Image: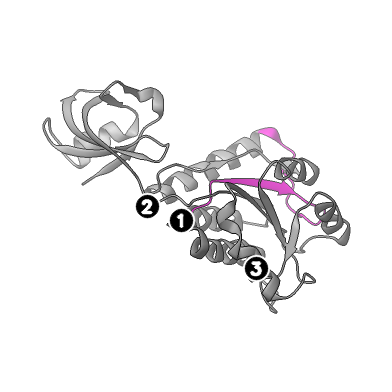
């Protein structure tokens, strides 16, 4: 059955109004008609099983028959604080992190970040592009939400936001051994919100690790090998999926 996303304000009682590009896709590509079944995800982890009741030029209406949990979200909301990488690596990171279940992604300016997004218009265009990639990955992996890509934050802002989470981690090559990482992973089920800090290509400076420690962000190791920035976040997310999957 074909599946589409709407925002909560597109649902009025038992009626869903589909607008925007999806109207053309349903009407002219899929050639769906009144009376056909469709799944509408409300963007909050619920799938609405619907029957199309009206097809018009700019809107498609569908009547909700049944609502179920999407069943694809992790038990904890994970925020990825990603040090801005060079070139188009951020696009790959966003795509794969969304597939793995991340709740939101925050691009972070750390000391060793090479990329500069000083132009507000350029930053807005980047965020638009990144959000579109997140949406595509969410649809492909049948997520119950479309993860948000938040505006770029300074390292200090990111640290402050992470302190409000149940647990925050920062992979670091000089952290304690893998046994400690395993113990941390075993404890994930008790947290509703988790933050992950990943450095850019040059990694974190020692002073940044110290700031993280001072703010109760826990350094962990991902193994004896040094991972690229586009690998590290996906590695830790993969570990977390194992522990947080229902």
- Per the image, the residue denoted by label 3 is 183
* Magenta range: 101-120
Badge 2 or badge 1: first in the primary sequence: 1
The vertical placement of 202 against 167, above or below, is below
Q: Give me the C-alpha separation between circle 3 and circle 1.
A: 25 Å
Label 3 with label 1: CB-CB less than 8 Å:
no
Residue topped by disc 2: 140
Q: Secondary structure at mark 2?
A: helix
Eyeballing the image, is 153 above or below 238?
A: above
Residue 41 position in % (x across, y down): 34, 38
The answer to whether the residue labelled 2 contacts the one labelled 1, judged by CB atoms less than 8 Å apart, is: yes
Quarter of the image for residue 7 reads top left
Residue at position x 16%, y 26% in the image = 53
Closest to the camera, between mark 3 and mark 2, is: 3
Residue at horizontal 68%, vertical 56%?
Answer: 85
| Image quarter in which the C terminus is found | bottom left
Q: Specify the farthest residue to the right.
A: 207
Query: Left or right: 138 with respect to 235?
Result: left
Please, what is the dominant secondary structure of the magenta stretch? Answer: loop
Residue at point 38%, 47% (across, down): 139
Q: In the rendered structure, which disc, 3 or 2, sits on the residue that comes first in sequence?
A: 2
Q: Which label was assigned to residue 226?
A: none
Q: Is residue 116 left or right of residue 48?
A: right
SS for dot 1? helix
Say few, some or many: other residues with alpha carbon within 10 Å of mark 3 (under 14 / 14 to 19 / 20 or more): few
Q: Which residue is mark 1?
A: 99
Alpha carbon distance from label 2 to label 1 = 8 Å
Which residue occupies the foreground of this view, 50 or 26?
A: 50
Along the line of sight, the residue nearer the viewer: 72 or 188: 188
Q: Mark 3 or 1 closer to N-term?
A: 1
């Amino acid at each position: 059955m074909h599946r589409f996303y709407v925002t909560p304000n597109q649902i009025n009682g038992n009626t869903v109004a589909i607008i925007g590009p999806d109207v053309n896709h349903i009407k002219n590509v899929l050639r769906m008609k009144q009376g056909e079944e469709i799944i509408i995800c409300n963007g909050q982890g619920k799938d609405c099983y619907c029957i199309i009741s009206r097809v018009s030029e700019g809107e498609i209406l569908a009547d909700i028959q049944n609502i179920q949990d999407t069943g694809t979200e992790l038990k904890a909301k994970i925020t990825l604080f990603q040090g801005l990488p060079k070139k188009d690596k951020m696009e790959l990171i966003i795509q794969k992190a969304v597939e793995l279940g991340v709740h939101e992604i925050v691009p972070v300016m750390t000391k060793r970040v090479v990329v500069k997004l000083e132009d507000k218009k350029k930053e807005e265009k980047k965020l638009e592009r990144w959000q579109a990639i997140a949406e595509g990955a969410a649809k492909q992996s049948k997520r119950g939400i479309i993860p948000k890509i938040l505006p770029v934050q300074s390292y200090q802002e990111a640290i402050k936001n992470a302190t409000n989470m149940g647990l925050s981690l920062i992979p670091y090559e000089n952290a304690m051994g893998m046994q400690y990482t395993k113990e941390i992973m075993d404890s994930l089920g008790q947290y509703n919100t988790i933050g992950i800090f990943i450095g850019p290509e040059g990694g974190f400076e020692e002073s940044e690790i110290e700031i993280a420690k001072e703010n109760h962000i826990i350094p962990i190791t991902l193994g004896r090998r040094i991972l690229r920035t586009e690998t590290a976040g996906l590695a830790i997310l993969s570990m977390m999926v194992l522990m947080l999957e229902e």
